[in-house]
Image: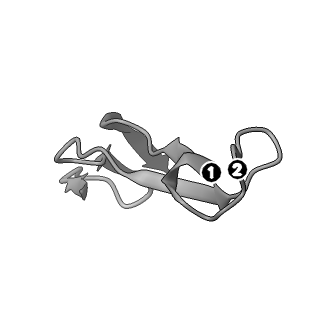
Amino acid sequence: MHAFYKLPIKSDNLKLEVFAHVFNLLDNVYIQDATDNSRFNAWDKNHTADDAEVFFGMPRNVNFGFTLRF
């Protein structure tokens, strides 16, 4: 989710905007990347689940701030 709001400032030269970003809003668990038959984790190299090396995605995180333009 990404949101922003331009603050109503009575100046022609100054613009202020606040913003917020929420990544993985629903805090789902998901696989971001996987490697089949990894050279570090493969057990018997027959392309089954025990041979996969997976990397989980990031949990929910929030970023917010402001932008000042002049």
Three-letter amino acid code at the position of disc 1: Asp
The one nearer the camera, 47 or 21, is: 47
The residue that label 1 is drawn on is 51
Q: Residue at x 35, y 35 (%)?
A: 59
Expressed as whole percent of the image width and height from the top left, the position of residue 52 reads 59, 52
Expressed as whole percent of the image width and height from the top left, the position of residue 30 reads 35, 51
Q: Residues within 10 Å of mark 2 (few under 14, many from 20)?
A: few
Judged from the image, the secondary structure of the residue bearing numbered disc 2 is: loop
Which is more N-terminal, label 1 or label 2? Answer: 2
Expressed as whole percent of the image width and height from the top left, the position of residue 36 reads 66, 61
The one nearer the camera, 20 or 59, is: 59
Q: Residue at x 34, y 34 (%)?
A: 61
Left/right of residue 8 with respect to residue 40 in the rendered view? left
Question: Image quadrant of residue 48?
Answer: bottom right
Specify the quadrant that holds the N terminus: bottom left
Q: Residue at x 62, y 51 (%)?
A: 51
Image marks 2 and 1: residues in contact by CB distance under 8 Å: yes
Res. 44 mark: 2
